[in-house]
Image (cartoon, rainbow, N blue to C red):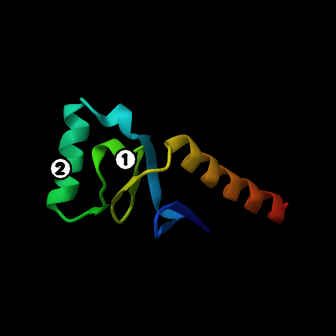
């Protein structure tokens, strides 16, 4: 299954490594280095203005900035996974 990250971006749920609140990433040297490294290596697949970014999604193939809150994205993933589990049961 897939989760919509906003705009035209949809990623497979199984590729998601983590969903992070963008506010929590600010001010952390390690997080800033990680994002700079993703940009430098071409793995930052979606970027947006800092004031528009609400979450950062790390996947096995790249990093995405999203204007959708991390809580909403986690709910989307959980709802899809819950629905799949209920269908199998």
Instruction: Please state if 24 lies on the left or on the right of 5 as rendered.
Output: left
Instruction: Please state if 33 lies on the left or on the right of 46 as rendered.
Output: left
**For the C terminus, which image quadrant?**
bottom right
Q: Is 62 located above or below residue 30 in the figure? A: below
Q: Nearer the viewer, residue 7 or 70?
A: 7
Q: Nearer the viewer, residue 67 or 84?
A: 67
Residue at 56% in and 41% down? 71
Q: Position of residue 55 (x, y in %)?
A: 42, 45
The quadrant holding residue 47 is bottom left
Q: Residues within 10 Å of mark 2 (few under 14, many from 20)?
A: some
Does the CB distance between marks 1 and 2 fall below 8 Å? Answer: no
Residue at 20% in and 65% down? 42
Q: Judging from the image, what secondary structure is the residue with disc 2 in? A: helix
Of discs 1 and 2, which sits in the foreground?
1
Marks 1/2: CA distance? 18 Å
Instruction: Please state if 10 lies on the left or on the right of 81 as rendered.
Output: left
For disc 1, the marked residue is: 52
Q: Position of residue 70 (x, y in %)?
A: 50, 43
For disc 2, the marked residue is: 36
Q: Judging from the image, what secondary structure is the residue with disc 1 in? A: helix
């Amino acid at each position: 299954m897939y989760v919509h990250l906003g705009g035209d971006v949809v990623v497979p749920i199984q590729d998601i490594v983590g969903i992070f609140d963008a506010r929590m990433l600010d001010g952390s040297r390690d997080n800033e280095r990680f994002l700079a490294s993703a940009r430098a290596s071409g793995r930052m697949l979606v970027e947006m203005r800092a004031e528009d970014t609400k979450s950062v999604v790390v996947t096995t193939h790249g990093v995405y900035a999203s204007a959708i809150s991390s809580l909403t994205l986690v709910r989307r993933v959980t709802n899809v996974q819950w629905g799949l589990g209920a269908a199998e049961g």
